[in-house]
Image (tube, helix red, strand yellow):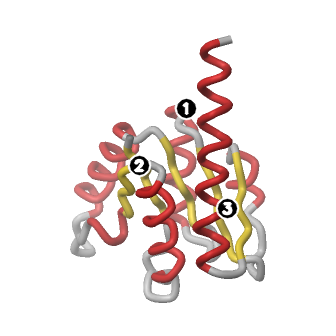
Amino acid sequence: MIAFVSASYAHRSRLAPALAAIRSALSAAGWTPRIFIEDYQFAPDDQRAMMAATQAELRACRLLVAEVTHKAIGVGIEVGYAAALGVPIVAVRHADAEPSTTVGGLAARTVVYRTPGDLERDLAQAVRDLFGEQRRGVSE
């Protein structure tokens, strides 16, 4: 199962510990994390190729994890596209960050964390809860 991880490209260095925690939580739960800003590199004039890759990855995933500590237009677009595809969304943000009402309104779960350890633990639980509910809904 593929989980698309969306995060601010401009803040990728600051988000490195959070992204590592997300990768660890998803991997431990049997998911293949695709952290787009780490897995792909595009030149500034490769907008079409970037969006084609984004759309292909989002169509292939079963979960989107949106790191929304920092506001980013690209994250919002990826969340909107995933929502339109019916892909469940888990929003994650640092406790000191302002909530995103747009992403929060589309997210099936929201994880607010203080440390990467909190994020890893709470994201793993949110994914278990979300997909446990989906399996129960299908079997009932």
Secondary element type, mark 3? helix
Q: Does residue 48 appear to the left or right of 95 in the view shown? A: left
In the displayed structure image, the side of residue 25 where residue 69 appears, left or right: right
**Please, what is the three-letter code of the amino acid marked with disc 3?**
Asp
Q: CA distance from mark 1 to mark 2?
A: 18 Å
Report the Cα–Cα distance between label 3 and label 1.
23 Å
Residue 13 position (above or below residue 134): below
Residue 46, by quadrant, is bottom left
Residue situated furthest front in the rendering: 28
Residue 31 circle label: 2
Quickly name the residue at label 3: 122
Q: Residue at x 32, y 71 (%)?
A: 38
In the rendered image, the quadrant that contains the N terminus is: top left
From the viewer's perspective, is 1 left or right of 121?
left
In this rendered view, identify the residue nearer to me: 41 or 39: 39
Q: Earlier in the sequence, mark 1 or mark 2?
A: 2
Q: Position of residue 136 (x, y in %)?
A: 66, 22
